[in-house]
Amino acid sequence: MRTGGQTKESAVAHEYLDAAATAPLRAEARAAMLAVFDAGAANPSSVHAPGNRAKRSLEESRFRIAAAFNARPADLVLTSGGTEANNLAIIGLALATPRGRHLVTTPIEHPSVLESCRYLERVFGFELTLLPVNFDGRVDPADAAAALRPDTTLISVGLANAEVGTVQPLPEIAAHAASLGVLVHTDAVQAASSLPLSFAGESWPGPDIHAMTVASHKFGGPQGMGALFVRRHLPLEAILHGGGQEGGARSGTENVAGAAGFAAAVSATCTGVGTRALELIRSRDALIDRVLAEVPGSRLTGHRSERLPGHASFVVAGVSGESLLIALDATGIAVSSGSACAAGMDGPSPALLAMGVDPALAQTAIRFTFAEALSEEAVERIVRALRSEVQAARR
């Protein structure tokens, strides 16, 4: 059985359905990293021949990542992952922009977005407005428009939510904010690997986005690599200080091999992303339809159609999501009960609570996410196992 180009070799052959946490490492990414390792270690800031070789490799990777999103290499800051990129975008833009001390975001954002905003609130006296979301996890653009003020510095709305897969009406939100001079950031970590995105021109999600975050491991690249796309004309306060790498935006010796793997994974994933999205949507909808029809008490979370192509999430009344996860894992199906970044936390998901889900029901959440289309046989096996384990748990 293969998922994301990976052959599974374990005591229990797993159907890997947790790509929203980490996609399987692509063969192209592994080969690109090995090529850098085999060439020999060198610091890209060094002026000797090995250093120049490392520098060329790094800049080639930067070019490939930027090109995949119709961005300029100068718009790209390489980071240690999505969390650092979100911190840099929110803290760096807010501190460098003297417009005011008001921030706008949503209660269903990744913790790195929310905690960055709360850091500015706590340390620098910023005021934070959290936009309401409906039962599908969507922001009403009218609510976003109403929240903006003359002293609003930045609005950050994730392109798609990790837990429920809902895609936001970001172009409409961003267009109004940008018309008022408000900076717009989006965390595109979950969306970028399965939807065709552009950081330039009129293409989706639109020209009014000032900063956008992506992460390598969602594409099947190495963990510990990410990127912030930020318009080159904008001032950006660094949050890591030192040698001034990445154009002064992010100090620290660059991860040359990680960048090469990141670039290879992005290039491979973004090639034919539109066609693959349609295939994922067919698998997603087949899985959703069958779960809702065959698993009593199941309810879809997130928007039915405006959601990520390879994302199906549910609550199942009367069953613990964590217990269901463990039971499915024993049958060879790897899933999640919510965001991997919230794993180990007690209590129901804050995102589901913000969407109006009852706290007890929110603790029954389970999420199926996949980087490649599922076969009919795979869907059959997943639904059969889920139905069986739910029945067993209720007994």
Image (cartoon, rainbow, N blue to C red):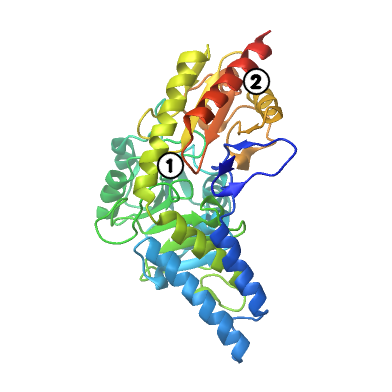
The residue under label 1 is which amino acid type? Answer: Ala
Q: Quadrant of residue 346?
A: top right
Disc 2 designates what residue? 320
Task: Identify the residue shown where x is 60% and y is 62%.
Answer: 30
Which quadrant does the C terminus fall into? top right
Q: Is residue 346 above or below residue 10?
A: above
Q: Position of residue 278 (x, y in %)?
A: 35, 40
Task: Identify the residue shown where x is 52% and y is 24%.
Answer: 380
Residue 74 appears in the figure: yes
Taking 16 as reference, is 141 left or right?
left
Task: Identify the residue shown where x is 28% and y is 57%.
Answer: 207
Q: Position of residue 192 (x, y in %)?
A: 43, 51
The residue nearer to you, when weighing 27 against 129, is: 27
Q: Is residue 86 above or below residue 313?
A: below
Element type at mark 2: loop
Residue 252 appears in the figure: no
Disc 1 designates what residue? 160
The residue nearer to you, when weighing 133 against 343, is: 343
Q: Quadrant of residue 136?
A: top left
Cα distance in 3D space between marks 1 and 2: 25 Å
Which quadrant does the N terminus fall into? top right
User: Crowding at label 2, few (<14), some or many (≥20) Cα neighbours within 10 Å?
Assistant: many
Element type at mark 1: loop
Total numbered badges shown on the rendered structure: 2
The residue under label 2 is which amino acid type? Answer: Ser
Q: Position of residue 78 (x, y in %)?
A: 52, 66
